[in-house]
Structures are given as structure tokens and as C-alpha cells.
Image (cartoon, coloured by chain):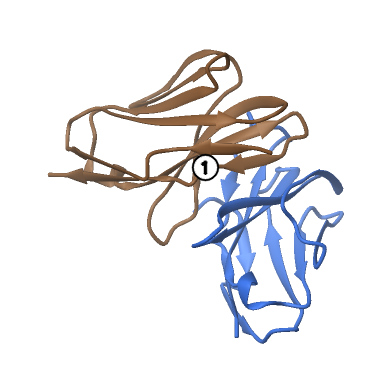
Chain colours: A blue, B brown
């Protein structure tokens, strides 16, 4: 158990819908990262927050948005869902920002878009 | 853009040593990380190299050569539990992460 929690574990929805994925980082961690993992695209970095502020942006679609709240939990919002958005979405956290800091991954949310 | 190459599969026997290579093309290279992922599990951070040379953590070591745009993960005294996928990831100065396609390691008894 990494100490990072993600809800829900599984999510099944239809194309065109909007969903929100939630992540609670390890106690004391200020940085949160979001990743998408699918069979055809592999593991992709989406976005990083540090202490409530966006710090890095990867291959995140405009239909996707995220935020980190004052209590440091984070949410990833996916809208106008398409079949290709079906994937595992991981959240990770680290004490500080920067690649040298060990990231601890949550168990992931499996999103299925029908 | 950025691209990384890793072997798709590697097989070795218990107790052996295996090296997983990673070559990358990137602008604004900052560092190279390695992650392990067991089937059905989440990635686990293994190591980070920001400077050239070898970093050792127990049975695992990671090496970086910035001039060759190359790194490797070395796993010693292989155990069955090391069977997993291993990903290298490049970080740029914007703290953007780009992952390689992953190497599936199978450890045989």
C-alpha cells in the first residue's frame, strides 16, 4: 500500500459523458501527478500539481482538466468522453516536485467508455 | 519531440544478471527515471539519474550517459518476483515526463 488513494476503482460510462476521478496523496506529499495508461498509447504523463498550483503539463487533452485543492487532494475531470479514453488512470504523489523525488502511485482508476 | 527505445522483452534465469537498455531522443533533457510495474499493479519508482554515472540501490543499479543519450537498468541476483515490466522515463526541464514503451522481463526458474 503506497498511501495514495484513488476513487473510484472502476468506472463505466458512455461516450459524450463527463467523469471525475479523485486522488488523495500520501500524508505530507505536496506534489500530485496524473498518468494515463492504455494498451496502444502506453504510460503517458498528463499533468502535475504542486501545493495547489499547476507545475507541468504533458499530453493532456483539452477535454481533460485537473486541479489540486487546498487539502492537497486532486481531481481529474474528463469530459466529452470518447471510446479511446478508456484506460487506467494513475495518480502519484511525492514530497516535493522534481523528477528526482520518488513518486508513489495509487492503485489506479479503470475507466471504460462504451 | 521526444522518443525512447527499450527492448520489448527480456528473459533470464533466477540468480542471473540482466541489463535493460534505454536510448532516448529529447530536447531539454533533465534526467532519466526507471519504474517497475507488475501485471495488474501500479508503477513503482526504482531510481533516478540526473548526472552521468551509476546509481546503486540494493540489487538494482541504474546508469546514465548524457553524451550518448543512453541509460540502463541493471538487475542482479534475479528473483522470480522481478518478473514485471520496466519503464524508463525521460524528464525535461519543464518537468514533463515521457515514458518508454516498456520492457517485459520474464525470470525463469
- On the rendered image, what quadrant is the C terminus of chain A found in? bottom right
In the foreground, B74 or A63: A63
State the residue at coordinates (57%, 13%): B67
Q: Which chain carries label 1?
A: B
In the foreground, A96 or A13: A13
Residue A86 visible in the picture: yes
State the residue at coordinates (62%, 77%): A83
* SS for dot 1: loop
In the foreground, B96 or A67: B96
Image height check: is B54 above or below B24? above
Give the image quarter of residue B107. top left
Residue tagged 1: B100
Image height check: is B34 above or below B40? above
State the residue at coordinates (54%, 13%): B52
Residue A106 position within the rendered picture, expressed as x and y whole percent measured from the top left: 57, 56
The answer to whether A67 appears left or right of B1 in the picture is right
Query: Which residue, as the protein is rendered here, is positioned at the far left?
Result: B109
Amino acid at each position: 500500500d503506497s498511501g495514495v488513494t484513488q476513487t473510484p476503482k472502476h468506472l463505466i460510462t458512455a461516450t459524450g459523458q463527463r467523469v471525475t476521478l479523485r486522488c488523495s496523496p500520501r500524508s505530507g506529499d505536496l506534489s500530485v501527478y496524473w498518468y494515463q495508461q492504455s494498451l496502444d498509447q502506453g504510460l503517458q504523463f498528463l499533468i502535475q500539481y504542486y501545493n495547489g498550483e499547476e507545475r507541468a503539463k504533458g499530453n493532456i487533452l483539452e477535454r481533460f482538466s485537473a486541479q489540486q485543492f487546498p487539502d492537497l487532494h486532486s481531481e481529474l475531470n474528463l469530459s466529452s468522453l470518447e471510446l479511446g479514453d478508456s484506460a487506467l488512470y494513475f495518480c502519484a504523489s511525492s514530497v516535493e516536485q522534481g523528477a528526482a523525488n520518488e513518486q508513489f502511485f495509487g492503485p489506479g482508476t479503470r475507466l471504460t467508455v462504451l | 519531440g521526444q522518443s525512447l527505445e527499450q527492448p520489448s522483452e527480456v528473459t533470464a534465469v533466477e540468480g542471473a544478471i540482466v541489463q535493460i537498455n534505454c536510448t532516448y531522443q529529447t530536447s531539454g533533457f533533465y534526467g532519466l527515471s526507471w519504474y517497475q510495474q507488475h501485471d495488474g499493479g501500479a508503477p513503482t519508482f526504482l531510481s533516478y539519474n540526473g548526472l552521468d554515472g551509476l546509481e546503486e540501490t540494493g540489487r538494482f543499479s541504474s546508469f546514465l550517459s548524457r553524451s550518448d543519450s543512453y541509460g540502463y537498468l541493471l538487475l542482479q541476483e534475479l528473483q522470480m518476483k522481478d518478473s514485471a515490466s520496466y519503464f524508463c522515463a525521460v524528464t525535461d526541464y519543464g518537468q514533463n515526463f515521457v515514458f518508454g514503451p516498456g520492457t517485459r522481463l520474464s525470470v525463469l526458474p
